[in-house]
Amino acid sequence: MMTSRVLSGVQPTGNLHLGNYLGAIKQWVDIQGSYECLFCIVDLHAITVPQDPKYLTESTLDTAAAYIACGIDPETSVIFNQSRIAGHCELAWILGTMTPLGWLNRMTQFKEKAGKHKDQSGLGLYGYPVLMAADILLYHATHVPVGEDQKQHLELTRDIAGAFNRQYDREYFTLPEPLIAGPATRVMSLRDGTKKMSKSDESEYSRIHLSDDSDTIAKKFKKAKSDMHEGITHDPDNRPEATNLINIYAAITGKTHEQVCQEVESMGFSQFKTLLSDAVIEHLGPITTTYRQLTDDKAYLQSLLDKGAENAAALAEKNIKQIKEIVGFVV
Ligand code: TRP
């Protein structure tokens, strides 16, 4: 029987926020009992834009702490940082040789990140999706939980897996399937409901950090952008801010959209924001406490990543050897 294996990852680029949690990590927690799971901290991806080395080290440990604080069980899931396993880079190179530039040129994330300065962007940023394909295929992951913005990269991964299978004339890679997340797949900025919640937004008020205390969370929701309409309704086209707050409330309470809409339709923003901020504070409280404790225990985090790297290597080394043999390398 084929095992169902999940691989996913986030970049260690600083303080995790509610978007990372509701858009990715919370879903991992919900599925970890049903799949064999590998949760990666993608430090190789992080350096596709310049990173301060000290900050990168700290962010990597903090991200490991966040995974555990959010409820990932390190006894059953493998938590590791990508750069420890050489196979990611090795496979990315091999896959890069069968990825046409035309496919990469379609990637919207590259277009957005490179902007008008395409000629100044590094090869790493351009090849980012190939490395992501390598992350997934190195472990023969069958399922990948991805948010809306990463769906295109997963599609590309499937195309690249197909290209490899065709080139070597065998069904070696199974094509990974996306796992679709719940209501708040895409958490938007609290200052602008049309923009994704992001660590690069200059306004602290645009996002809730996992390390924020209750007062800060309450203040950020109080200041969150609202609109002039009456009541609170889910209307993505005309009311992006109200819609975002409803999505967050649904995701954090586990209620359906319909339930939430009924509950809040007659409220004003101020009443709804209090309800929402209380729910978020209650939900994040225990996570924040554990997160703070763990980030102080660097020795524990280091040993956790050591153990994760060992477990990931056991799978990766076997697979990369097979792949090299298929390619014809002498191993
Ligand atoms: N590109 C993903 C993001 O920015 C992170 C990532 C890297 C990833 N490798 C992955 C996600 C493999 C899923 C599977 O969110």
Image: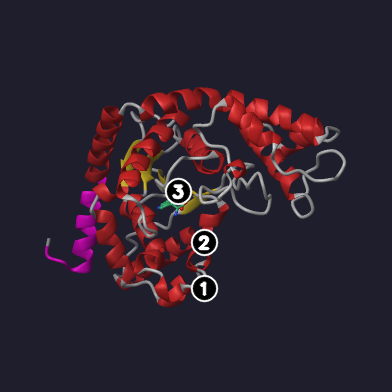
Could you say where residue 315 lies in the image, as x and y percent from the top left?
Answer: 26, 46
- Secondary structure, mark 2, is helix
* Mark 1 and mark 3: Cα distance apart in space: 34 Å
Magenta segment: 315-330
Could you say where residue 77 lies in the image, as x and y percent from the top left?
Answer: 36, 35
How many numbered tags mark residues here? 3
The mark that comes first in sequence, 1 or 3, is 1
Could you say where residue 194 lies in the image, as x and y percent from the top left?
Answer: 67, 54
Q: Which residue is identified by label 3?
A: 143
Q: Is residue 62 magenta?
A: no
Apparent side of residue 292 relative to residue 328 in the rendered image (left or right): right
Q: Residues within 10 Å of mark 2 (few under 14, many from 20)?
A: some
Report if the beta carbon of the residue with label 1 is closer than 8 angstroms to ligand 1.
no
Q: Which residue is identified by label 1?
A: 116
* Mark 1 and mark 2: Cα distance apart in space: 21 Å
Residue visible at 39% across and 29% down in the picture:
73
Give the position of the N terminus as an image quadrant: top left
Report if the beta carbon of the residue with label 3 is closer than 8 angstroms to ligand 1.
no
Q: Which residue is identified by label 2?
A: 152
Could you say where residue 152 lies in the image, as x and y percent from the top left?
Answer: 51, 61
Dot 1 amino acid type: Lys
